Amino acid sequence: MMKTEHEKLLAGEAYDYRAPELQDLIAQGRKRLAIINTASDQAERAAAMHAFFGRVGQRLTINGPISAVYGVHIQVGDDVFINGSCTFQDSNHIILGDRVIIAPDVKLYCGGHALDATQRFGVRPDGSRYLITTTKPITVGNDVWIAGNVTVIGGVHIGNNVVVGAGAVVTKDVPDNTVVGGVPARTIETLPPLER
């Protein structure tokens, strides 16, 4: 049986984002995100958050407008705080653990394109062209602070009890109990394990 474009997306295979099923998900997400970003009624906003995200833990705070592509691919744990102007390019799963703090202007990018420029566009049977994208999930553990203007690339796992310094670009997994920073991010110091 052939995979749908959505199944290809989640499997990290090349997919066509213009497929009707994906465009429908994007349209639904945009409507819900508009409510999250603009509604003053807290009950309406909370309902939109629960409809938008794939999973919402307790006490989620979104402090300002954010952007995302689908929403349904994002899972959020308990006591998560997301500041404004954050971008969730959730063309695969983005999983945030408990007690995650995301500062302003953080970008989590699941999607990517081929290094070989000749492999970036495909041709449909009708001759029309489309952008080929592949994706990888991003996971963030518990008790993580991602400081301002950080970029996290698809395929990265950030462990528990981690601080990612401002402006870092995270291209590789980050182990538990670590402070990382820089471009690309590297270990700055080790933190004592949390006793919870």
Image: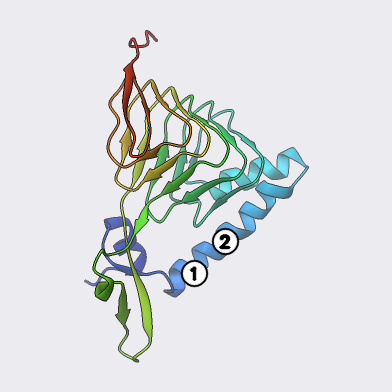
**Across the whole image, how many numbered discs are drawn on residues?**
2
The three-letter code of the residue at mark 2 reads: Gln
User: Does 42 appear above or below 79?
Assistant: below
Expressed as whole percent of the image width and height from the top left, the position of residue 100 reads 48, 28
State the quadrant of the N terminus. bottom left
Taking the view exactly as shown, the residue that stands out farthest to the right is 40
Taking the view exactly as shown, the residue that stands out farthest to the front is 183
Describe residue 34's horizontal placement relative to residue 171 as left or right.
Answer: right
Q: Residue placed at 41% from the left, 36% from the top?
A: 168
Expressed as whole percent of the image width and height from the top left, the position of residue 41 reads 77, 42
Write down the residue under mark 1. 23
Describe residue 119's horizontal placement relative to residue 67 as left or right.
Answer: left
User: Does 61 appear above or below 171?
Assistant: above
State the quadrant of the C terminus. top left
**Which SS class for mark 2?**
helix
Taking the view exactly as shown, the residue that stands out farthest to the bottom is 126
The 10 Å Cα crowd at callout 1, few under 14, some 14 to 19, many 20 or more, is: some
Q: Residue placed at 32% from the left, 85% from the top?
A: 124
Label of residue 146 in the image: none
The three-letter code of the residue at mark 1 reads: Gln
Label of residue 28 in the image: 2
**Which SS class for mark 1?**
helix
Expressed as whole percent of the image width and height from the top left, the position of residue 62 reads 62, 37
User: Does 130 appear above or below 69?
Assistant: below
Q: Nearer the viewer, residue 18 or 114?
A: 114
The 10 Å Cα crowd at callout 2, few under 14, some 14 to 19, many 20 or more, is: some
Mark pair 1, 2: CA separation: 9 Å
Choose the circle earlier in sequence order: 1 or 2: 1
Expressed as whole percent of the image width and height from the top left, the position of residue 33 reads 62, 52
Q: Residue placed at 67% from the left, 54% from the top?
A: 34
Q: Nearer the viewer, residue 152 or 143?
A: 152
Describe residue 98's horizontal placement relative to residue 172 as left or right.
Answer: right
